[in-house]
Each structure stands twice: as C-alpha cells, then as structure tokens.
Amino acid sequence: MTVPRALILVVEDELQMRKFIRASLTSHGYRILEATSANEAMMLMTTQNPDLILLDLGLPDADGIDLTKQIREWSSVPILIISARGREDDKVLALDAGADDYITKPFGVNELLARIRVAERHARGVGNSPLAQILEFGEIKIDMNRREITRSTETIHLTPIEYKLLVLLALHAGKVLTHRQILKEVWGLSYVDQPHYVRVHMAELRKKIEIDPSRPKLIVTEPGVGYRLRE
C-alpha cells in the first residue's frame, strides 16, 4: 500500500504564487491545503491538522510573524516562511518567532522541495534525535555517550562550549539557527544580546572541524542571521 505524502498548508494570498506552489508540490505527490488569510489558516490548522506549513509573511489580515507566534503557542508543526522580504531583520524575527526555515521569493522548485524534505526529517526526528547515541555528518562523528568527536579515526578535542555548539548544530542539521537561539541554548537567556560570543567560538570550532576554515563546508554562515550545519 502506498503511503500518502505529507499534507501541506500553503498560506499565501497571491494567486500566481499559490498556483506555482500547488503545481510544484502536487506533481511530487504532496497533498495541499490553501489559505489566503491568517484566519483561514488557523481554521484549517485546527480542523485538518497539516504536517507542514508554507507561510507568506504579508497576509491581508495579519503579519505572518504574528501568526507564527500564535501557532507556536500550541503546535510544533514545521513552519517554512516564503516571503519577498529578504532583509536579515525579517529572517531573524521569523526564525526567533518559531519558524523552522525561511525561503526568499523568487525561489525554484528544487530549493523548495529540499527545504520541505529537511523540515520533514526534523519533524520525524530521523538522525537528529537528542536520544540518538551517534550523530554523523560528513566525516564527523559525535558520540553523545562518550562526548567524543572524531573525523575518520582522528579524535577532535573541543572545549565544553565548542562541544555544545557542535551538538546543537548537529541536532538541527540543515536548519538555520539564529544568534539569539544559539546564545539562549548554549549560554543562557542572560546572554541573548551578546552575538560576538557566537562569532568568536564558532570561528574556533571551524578551525577544528573544517578542512579549510577560511572556506567552511560544514558550518555555513547565514549573514546577519546565524548559522546552519549542512546535512
């Protein structure tokens, strides 16, 4: 028996964009719900229980960031922002509000599908569960029980802060983490306004796990926003 693909709620008031997303996703087996306003989105959220939300920020009756906060009060459903707002501040606000990812319009089908796949993996907890004993990405392996980091057969020695940073990124591989999110998880709430802490320690971490720290392949900088660990 064929298992149906995820049910995706598309919250977008622009008709042409909805048609593009609908055609792109249904052709790959996804099931689609469509809403053109925040109120309609909330109604579908509570009655249809979608697996994932694609959310535009510029809705006629509410801002998408406010809607994200509202949804996060009671649901952990993956939320991917799709917006023409490309400013760093908008991305940071959306991610800090609880969005899982941010795609700037215009975007291609392949990018959209890739971001959806990442969100689906996070939702299932495949490979990044806090209960997992081993986390792997590329040649890097994290043994959670032994608190040991290796590249192939070489042991990499990290400070406690560097270890916490790497584990945090690995648990959310493929997802952008803002400076504020990282500071909150690694240093605590009292440090959320100290982004230089992240930059300094991330630079040291890269020296230890990247082949060429000047051209990082694993830990990718999202300028003005935060960092993403490549899957």
Image: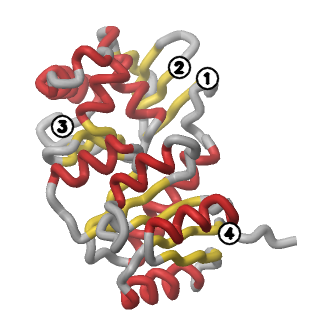
Residue 231 in sight from this viewpoint: no
Reading the image, the residue beneath label 2 is: 143
Query: Which element carries disc 3, helix, strand or loop?
Result: loop
Query: Which element carries disc 4, helix, strand or loop?
Result: loop
Tell me the quarter of the picture where residue 154 sits.
top left
Does residue 50 sit above or below 21 in this rendering? above
Sequence-first disc among 3 and 4: 4
Sequence-first disc among 4 and 1: 4
Instruction: Bin the neighbour count of mark 1 within 10 Å (Cα to Cα): few under 14, some 14-19, many 20 and up.
Output: some
Q: Amino acid at mark 3?
A: Asp
Q: Amino acid at mark 2?
A: Asp
Reading the image, the residue beneath label 4 is: 5
Q: Amino acid at mark 4?
A: Arg
Q: Position of residue 179 (x, y in %)?
A: 23, 33
Q: Position of residue 62 (x, y in %)?
A: 35, 63
Reading the image, the residue beneath label 1 is: 133
Query: Which element carries disc 2, helix, strand or loop?
Result: strand
Q: Quadrant of the N terminus?
A: bottom right
Q: CA distance from mark 3 to mark 2?
A: 23 Å
* Relative depth, front residue between 21 and 209: 21
Q: Amino acid at mark 1?
A: Gln
Q: Position of residue 38 (x, y in %)?
A: 45, 66
Q: CA distance from mark 3 to mark 4?
A: 39 Å
Sequence-first disc among 3 and 2: 2
Sequence-first disc among 2 and 4: 4
Reading the image, the residue beneath label 3 is: 212
Tell me the quarter of the picture where residue 216 sits.
top left
Marks 2 and 1 close (CB-CB < 8 Å)? yes
